Image: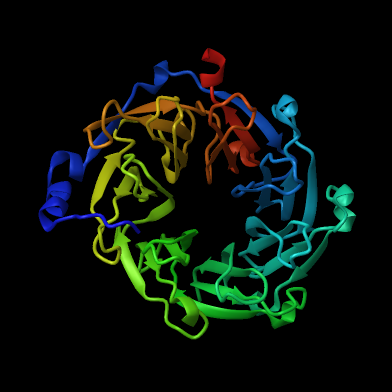
Amino acid sequence: MPNRKLTLAAVVWSLMTPAGLLAQASADLSTDHPWKRHVIDSSSRGADGVKLSHVNGDERLDITTGWEEGGVTRVYLHPGYGRAKTAWPAVTVGKTPSVEDAVFCDLDGDGAIDVISSCEGGTRSMFVHWAPKASSRYLHPEAWVTEAIPATVAQTAWMYALPMQIDGRNGVDLAVASKGKDGLVGWLQSPANPRALVDWRLHRLYRAGWIMTLASVDVDGDGDLDLLVSDRKGGNSGILWLENPGTDAVAGNWPEHRIGAAGREVMFLDAADLDGDGHRDIIAAVKPDEIHWFRPPSVPSDPWPVQVIKVAHRAGIGSAKAVRVGDIDGNGKADIVYSCESATPPKRGVVWLSYDKTPHEKDWHVNDISGPEGIKFDLIELFDIDGDGDLDVLTCEERHQGKGIGVFWYENPLGERE
């Protein structure tokens, strides 16, 4: 990480001044206009998170999602900008009861993009969905083969798999995380033949309560990827990072460094440069109604100064779930998109926050995206889905009218005004 001088006095100022301690987010949402919503898929129940990758070579991002109550994992191929507002071509890649998350990964290096599912509940296993090698059969469900990873079977309530190269050998490895009894953060080491799933080896790194975020970020700037974590429950709840020991990644200890929000129920976070100073910050949704903005100290193992943005001090918004940083209104400044759960109508479940001159100012503006429809929203992804040059909002919802809205995106109205 580039050197960043941060004196003790600066840390104390950031924590004690009104801007450093608490900023308010204000809006009269009743005067706002929801964005247009376009449903990608509503065929099952309990859509639980969205993950992206380029899987068919057309340079447009595709999606995978696990449907928790429906017990299936599905893939969606971007149909092209002209058809992005209709249902997307889709395939069920496997049956996955109690699936919590799905992620793309070419696990065996054959050029076909596979999917890894993480399951909790009574399943408590991870599965690889091997993609067909022929791209023409990618949307054929019978062409996919699903296998459990033996090292994960009946071990814990799995939440996430994160593809990353850890040991510098063989194929891609998988960082993994879970919750509850025997909860952990660890990694699965790829054998020489990734198809030999029985040879994958699980390494445990951290005893977890309930992991919400597992991200690969070079926090200390030493050239390898560390693990950035938000732990929602238990005695170790808060935000932390596990330092990759480099060449000793297999046998070595991954030192644990705490970032902040100790004892708080931290939900999803994002790593992004919120204030435009060239340094990657950490922005986290924290229950019941806050966003915590951490700025990196010169020594990343030191305490991180924090600014707290209070979101729902007025009625009309659900409780904190996820954040994502991006320039929503095209003014060159980073905004925050914020999703919620417990957004029982007329509460809003997805909004975006903006500031006037500096993110350190007292009042942030809250702007409606979703309107009152939807109750339990999830992860957010920001990208230009319809090709009009602005950032749209992709997410999913799993409680509306007992089934959930499904997988969908909100169309940024900025493109219509330009």
**For this rendering, which residue is in front, 216 or 58?**
58
Picture layout, residue 385 above or below residue 227: above
Residue plotted at (69% across, 47% down)? 54
Q: Quadrant of the N terminus?
A: bottom left
Relative to 94, does residue 51 appear above or below in the rendering? above
Above or below residue 370? Residue 241 is below
Whether residue 140 appears in this view of the structure is no
Answer left or right for 300 relative to 417.
left
Residue displayed at 47% across by 67% down: 224
Q: Where is residue 373 in the image (x, y as percent from the top left)?
A: 55, 29
Kindly indicate the quadrant of the structure image that contains residue 289. top left
Q: In this view, does 374 lie to the left or right of 12?
A: right
Total labels drawn? 0
Query: Which of these two is toward me, 319 or 202?
Result: 202
x, y percent for residue 374: 55, 34
Tell me residue 28's x, y (percent): 35, 21
Query: Image quadrant of residue 134?
Result: bottom right
Q: In this view, does 299 lie above or below 367?
A: below
Residue 165 relative to residue 345: left or right: right
User: For the view shown, which residue lies furthest in the bottom direction?
Assistant: 251
